[in-house]
Amino acid sequence: MSDIGDWFKSIPLITRYWFAGSIAVPLIGKLGLISPMYLVLWPENFFHKFQIWRPVTSTLYFPVGPGTGFLYLVNLYFLYQYSTRLETGAFDGRPADYIFMLLFNWICIVITGLMMDMQLLMIPLIMSVLYVWAQLNRDMIVSFWFGTRFKACYLPWVILGFNYIIGGSVVNELIGNLVGHLYFFLMFKYPMDLGGRSFLSTPQFLYRFFPTRRGGVSGFGAPPSRRPMAQEQGGGGGGGGRHNWGQGFRLGDD
């Protein structure tokens, strides 16, 4: 048990709370301590009965059973792996920026869920985080089942097909990928590669609660840096304005 405790404490703080919530809430529903009917997202109850907790619980809850247990465990693994890699890589020492990314993705997914009458939002949020990691490490070669190898930028779409095969819904994974792409485009691609204005920025109050710090574990990929002004305006030399998107680790690496 001490080994499990040490492993749990080694998980980065934000990922640790998300990971723990994604275990605790399904367990509460499974044991019947709270009816799963109160944990899913129902627009009628949210808007007219003011059950404002539903957007949060529907992001953490997943109905675990004989037909869904494997899908749940696979996505819990993706949560742990890729949230950890982002928090200790591109967002290393910047918890406010990472929380803002999660909040932005979550708000977009909740709005989509209310519009499309989706009850469960766990998989879309996990996939949005995985998509951002894949784009920040897009040229990294990753390995998947049966020795298949491909660039990380294709990983979200491979997992979309994989989750569908083992019992998931293409809609959940697709929404997660689109929301992840929206964040990546507005935060990195449009202002840094295309020279547009920055539409997203972390609110200052988050920095007050979660101040930027130095140190930590890095090497899991980094966000692209802004090009020099001379290169932006003059077109510069070789490279075509491409960025070094950072490096990552292969699937399954500890």
Image (cartoon, rainbow, N blue to C red):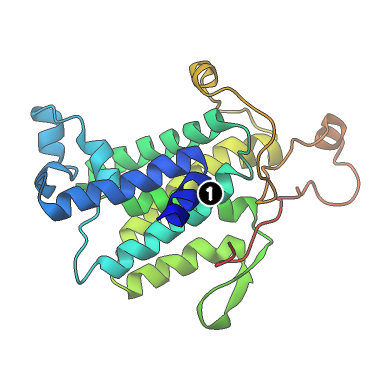
Describe residue 122's horizontal placement relative to residue 133 as left or right.
left
Residue nearer the viewer, 141 or 242: 141
Please name the residue that numbered disc 1 is placed on.
84
Residue nearer the viewer, 6 or 58: 6
Q: Quadrant of the C terminus?
A: bottom right
Describe residue 185's horizontal placement relative to residue 62 as left or right.
right
> In the structure shown, which secondary structural element does the residue marked by tag 1 occupy?
helix
| Residue 186 occupies quadrant | top right
10 Å crowding of disc 1: few (<14), some (14-19), many (20+): many
- Residue 110 x/y as whole percent: 30, 39
Residue nearer the viewer, 13 or 39: 13
Residue ranking furthest to the right: 237
**Residue 120 showing in the rendered view:** yes
Residue 160 drawn above or below residue 49: below
- Residue drawn 43% across the image and 50% down it: 5
Describe residue 48's horizontal placement relative to residue 169 as left or right.
left
Residue 224 drawn above or below residue 95: below
Q: Label 1 amino acid?
A: Thr
- Residue 226 x/y as whole percent: 74, 35
Residue 207 drawn above or below residue 240: above
| Residue 106 occupies quadrant | top left
Image label count: 1
